[in-house]
Image: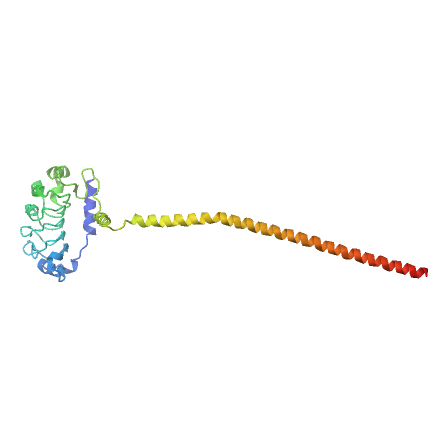
Amino acid sequence: MEDQWANCGHQRSADRPDPGAAEAAMDMKKRITLELRNRSPAEIAELVVDNSRSADGEVEGLTEAFTELEFLSMVNVGLSSLAKLPSLPKLHKLELSDNNLSGSLDTLSEKCPNLTYLNLSGNKIKELSNVEALQNLKSLQSLDLFNCDITSLEDYRESVFELLPQVTYLDGFDQEDNEAPDSEADDEDEDAEDGAAPHGDYDDEDEEDEDGSEGAGLSFQPNRVDQDDDDDDDNNDDDDDDDEFAEEEEEEQAGVQGEKRKRDGDDEGEDDQDEDD
């Protein structure tokens, strides 16, 4: 099962987008300014500064003006401290993987009290005491410590779940080894709750249309049978007319032949009379 968790974490790291790969040398402050794209910080709900360069391992360029920020990703930026992280009360998801963090996690409960998802994979977290400060994150549901030294501790998972009872998923799995739901699927569910029509509705409408079409096709079948019966009756009437016409023609021919035989008989009688004379 440990291999399964490891593979899962490795897959997530491999699948993670790398929007800042082409700007690896850009410092974090400049990168944040670039990501604003002439918008005010209060208009930003998601911010990704992956692979930028932090100054002396500290957060820079991020201020409390980002009042609406809900998702923040600072992957592989060289962070060793979170002391300068500003207050972000609406932040729910925080990506901090592949940095040099080993402590100062107590800052998170103070500056980001509403976190539900925290990814600390690939950091220098070695002991349970390093994550003990996360107890104050009462809304935390998912924690990722994959590829940290702490994962090699005996009874690592049991210990973390006991230390952080509010956490449901650790490294992508719950205590019963059920995998965490996909975040994209959660987003789709939220869209459906916001009023977007579920995909199934369209399928139901199509099925109703198909059923209606089939019903209509069946309703016309009796008419087709009636029409076939009418055609048979017409054919029978035509056959009767043909029979009557044939009989009349035979009668006419018989009459003509009778008339001819009569004329022939009269002619023979006249010839016999002439001979007698």
Task: Determine whether 212 is above or below 27 in the image.
Answer: above
Task: Determine whether 23 is above or below 98 in the image.
Answer: below
Quadrant of the snapshot with the N terminus: top left
Q: Position of residue 123 (x, y in %)?
A: 11, 48
Q: Position of residue 8 (x, y in %)?
A: 20, 45
Q: In the displayed structure, does residue 273 sit left or right of residue 162?
A: right
> Along the line of sight, which residue is nearer the eye, 104 or 148?
104
Identify the residue at horizontal 18%, vertical 46% (top origin).
9
Identify the residue at horizontal 89%, vertical 60% (top origin).
270
> Along the line of sight, which residue is nearer the eye, 265 or 100?
265
Quadrant of the snapshot with the C terminus: bottom right
Q: How many marks?
A: 0
Residue lying furthest bottom = 38
> Along the line of sight, which residue is nearer the eye, 172 or 155?
172
Q: Position of residue 15 (x, y in %)?
A: 21, 51
Task: Determine whether 47 is above or below 146 in the image.
Answer: below
Looking at the rendering, which quadrant does residue 162 occupy? top left
Q: Position of residue 44 (x, y in %)?
A: 13, 56
Identify the residue at horizontal 11%, vertical 56% (top origin).
42
Residue 127 makes an appearance in the image = no
Residue 257 makes an appearance in the image = yes
Q: In the displayed structure, does residue 199 sit left or right of residue 54?
A: right
Looking at the rendering, which quadrant does residue 145 occupy? top left
Q: How is the image coloured?
A: rainbow
Q: In the displayed structure, does residue 71 sit left or right of residue 198?
A: left
